[in-house]
Image: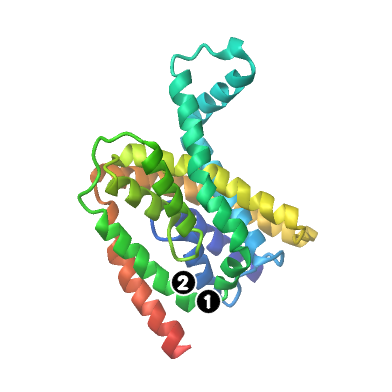
C-alpha cells in the first residue's frame, strides 16, 4: 500500500468522523494535512479532495435520513404533478423544502463571494486552530439549551447564517447549526435533522461551483485515490452520524468543547510558536 493511499485513508476517516461530530471536518483536514505534509494526497487539488470526501459523507446523510428525503422528493414532484399530492404531510413538507432553500442562501452567498479567501485559509493552520477554539465556545453556550420550539423563518435564517460561518475551516458546520438551533429553543433531534438536511444543498453547491470553475483535472491515479477517499469517508461518516444522534439524545453535545478548546490552544501554540 503506497503512502498516498495511506494518507488518503487517514484524511478520509478524519473527514468522515469530524463531518458530523461538532469538531470541524475541514479544520481537521487542514491540520492533519499540515502535520502529514500533504493536504492534497490525490494530486487533484485540495478543494477537490475536500469535495470527494464530502460526497462520501453526503451518502451517509442520505442513508440515515432516506425516509425524510424520499418524502421531500415526493412532495417536490407533487408540485409538478398534482396527482402525486396524496401525502397528508404535503403542506408541511412543502414548507420544509422552502426552509431548506432559505437556509441555504447565506452559505451560497459566502461561498461565492469569499471563495478565494476561504481557499487561502486552507494554507493557514494557525487561523484554523483559533477557529476551533471559537467553535468550542459556541458549543459551551448551547449547554442546557433546547426545547420543543418549532422551526420558523427567523430560526431558519439564523441557522443558515451559522452554516455560512461554518464554511471557514475550523468552524464546525454541525456544531454551529445545531448550537444555534438549541439557542433558539429547538430540540436536539429536530435541530440535528434540519442541520443535516441543510447540508445536502451546501455540499452539492460546493461540488457544482468547483466543476463550473473548470479547475479540476483528473488522472487515472488521482481518480482511484479520490474514489478510495469517498468510500472511506462514507463508512466513517455513517458511524459518526449515528454516534452523534446517540450523543444528542444523551444531552452531551456541549462536551465536545472540552476537546476543541484545549486542542485549538495546543495547535495554535504549535503552529505559531514552534513551526
For the point 31% across and 70% down, which residue is it? 261
Along the line of sight, which residue is nearer the eye, 256 or 240? 256
Residue 168, image x, y percentages: 50, 63
* Discs 1, 2 touching: Cβ within 8 Å: yes
Residue 50 vertical position relative to residue 200 in the rendered view, above or below? below
Picture quadrant of residue 170: bottom left
**Label 2 crowd (10 A; few <14 / some 14-19 / many >=20):** many
Residue under the point 58% across and 18% down: 78
Tell me how far mark 1 sits from mark 2, CA to CA. Answer: 6 Å
Which residue: 38% across, 42% down? 154
Q: Residue at x 26, y 53 (%)?
A: 142
Q: Number of marks in the image?
A: 2
Image coordinates of residue 260 in percent, x first then y, are: 34, 66
Q: What residue is pinned by disc 1? A: 124
Q: Is residue 258 left or right of residue 178?
A: left
Residue at mark 2? 128
Classify mark 2: helix, strand or loop.
helix
Amino acid at each position: 500500500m503506497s503512502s498516498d493511499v495511506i494518507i488518503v485513508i487517514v484524511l478520509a476517516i478524519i473527514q468522515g468522523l469530524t463531518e458530523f461530530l461538532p469538531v470541524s471536518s475541514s479544520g481537521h483536514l487542514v491540520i492533519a494535512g499540515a502535520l502529514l505534509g500533504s493536504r492534497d494526497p490525490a494530486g487533484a487539488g485540495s478543494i477537490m479532495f475536500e469535495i470527494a470526501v464530502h460526497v462520501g459523507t453526503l451518502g451517509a446523510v442520505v442513508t440515515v435520513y432516506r425516509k425524510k428525503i424520499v418524502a421531500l422528493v415526493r412532495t417536490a414532484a407533487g408540485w409538478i404533478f398534482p396527482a402525486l399530492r396524496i401525502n397528508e404531510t404535503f403542506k408541511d413538507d412543502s414548507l420544509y423544502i422552502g426552509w431548506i432553500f432559505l437556509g441555504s442562501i447565506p452559505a451560497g452567498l459566502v461561498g461565492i463571494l469569499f471563495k478565494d479567501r476561504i481557499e487561502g485559509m486552507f494554507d493557514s493552520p494557525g487561523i484554523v486552530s483559533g477557529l476551533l477554539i471559537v467553535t468550542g465556545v459556541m458549543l459551551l453556550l448551547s449547554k442546557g439549551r433546547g426545547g420543543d420550539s418549532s422551526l420558523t423563518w427567523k430560526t431558519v435564517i439564523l441557522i443558515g447564517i451559522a452554516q455560512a460561518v461554518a464554511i471557514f475551516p475550523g468552524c464546525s458546520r454541525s456544531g454551529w447549526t445545531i448550537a444555534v438551533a438549541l439557542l433558539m429553543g429547538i430540540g436536539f433531534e429536530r435541530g440535528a435533522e434540519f442541520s443535516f438536511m441543510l447540508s445536502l444543498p451546501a455540499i452539492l453547491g460546493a461540488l457544482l461551483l468547483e466543476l463550473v470553475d473548470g479547475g479540476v483535472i483528473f488522472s487515472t491515479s488521482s481518480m482511484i485515490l479520490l474514489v478510495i477517499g469517498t468510500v472511506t469517508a462514507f463508512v466513517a461518516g455513517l458511524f459518526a452520524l449515528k454516534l452523534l444522534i446517540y450523543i444528542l439524545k444523551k444531552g452531551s453535545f456541549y462536551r465536545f468543547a472540552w476537546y476543541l478548546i484545549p486542542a485549538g490552544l495546543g495547535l495554535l501554540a504549535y503552529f505559531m510558536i514552534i513551526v
